[in-house]
Structure formats: C-alpha cells, structure tokens
Image (cartoon, rainbow, N blue to C red):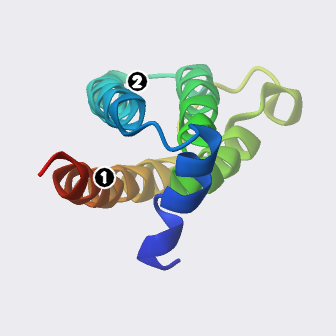
Amino acid sequence: MSYKHHFNMVSFNERMGGDTDAIISILKFAINNTQERFKETKNFKQRIQIYRFAHFLRGTSANVSFEVCVKICEDLLILTDSSKNGEDQTITDEMKIKLNELDSAIQITSNIVDSYIGSKSG
C-alpha cells in the first residue's frame, strides 16, 4: 500500500472539521498510545491476547484514519478468531508475521503523522 493509505489526512481532517488543535492533540495521543500498547505484544503467549489487541487497535486506527493498520488488524482478527480455532491458543508463524507487518505499519504511520503535525505546528 502507498504511504497515503497509512494515514488518510483528508478523511481525518474532514471528520474533525478542520480543527487543527484537536487534530494534533488526537493524533499525538493515538500514536503514543498505539506505540506503547504495541510493546505489550512482545510478551503475548496466547492468540486471544493478539485478538484483543487487534480489536483495540483496529478501532483506534479507524477513528484516526490509519488505514493500513486497520487492514492488518482485520487480518489478525481473522487469524486469531477463537470460533475458527477452538481452544487452540498457539501463536502461529503467520500471526507473528502479521504482528511484524503491523509494527512496520505503525512506524511508517508514526513518521507520516509526525511530519503532518510538524507542518501544522510550524
């Protein structure tokens, strides 16, 4: 996906009514919270933990137009869905790969948002 899909500035700006102060405040919170919460994934031992995290992050990402993160979280929700996996709580290699993709997407999105905030703050 292209960089413009990591953070849909137009969509988020419209949703926020163009209020620059609110946009900057919410984006800073979303990025900081996402980065902090992602650190927890390093200690996950069960797929339900990934499922809960992906559910949380999908909602946060959708609210602030982080479109690539939303897509990866949707993939993780499918992979970790207990209705399809029964009692198996094993974290598979495919789940680990998706978490790595998500980590990269969060870093790219953070850089894009930092640049966006810098352009609005200056």
Q: Residue furthest bottom?
A: 2
Q: Which mark is residue 37?
A: none
- Of 87 and 78, the residue lying toward us: 78
- Of 26 and 1, the residue lying toward us: 26
Q: Is residue 102 left or right of residue 88?
A: left
Residue at 27 percent across and 25 percent down: it is: 36
Residue at 53 percent across and 77 percent down: it is: 1
Judged by depth in the image, the label closer to the viewer, 2 or 1, is: 1
> Is residue 75 visible to the viewer in this orientation of the structure?
yes
Dot 1 crowding, Cα within 10 Å, few <14, some 14–19, many 20+:
many
Q: Is residue 51 left or right of residue 83?
A: left
> Is residue 94 visible to the viewer in this orientation of the structure?
no
Residue 100 location, x and y as percent?
A: 37, 54
- Of 53 and 17, the residue lying toward us: 17
Judging by the rendered image, the residue that carries numbered circle 1 is 113
Could you give the CA–CA distance between mark 2 and mark 1, rounded to whole angstroms? 27 Å
Identify the mark nearer the N-term, 2 or 1: 2
Is 86 above or below relative to 20? above
- Of 76 and 33, the residue lying toward us: 33
Residue 38 location, quadrant: top left
Q: Are marks 2 and 1 in contact (CB under 8 Å)?
A: no
Residue 49 location, x and y as percent?
A: 53, 20
Q: Which amino acid does the dot numbered 1 rest on?
A: Val
Dot 2 crowding, Cα within 10 Å, few <14, some 14–19, many 20+:
few
Residue 85 location, x and y as percent?
A: 79, 33
Q: Which amino acid does the dot numbered 2 rest on?
A: Phe
Judging by the rendered image, the residue that carries numbered circle 2 is 44
Residue 111 location, quadrant: bottom left
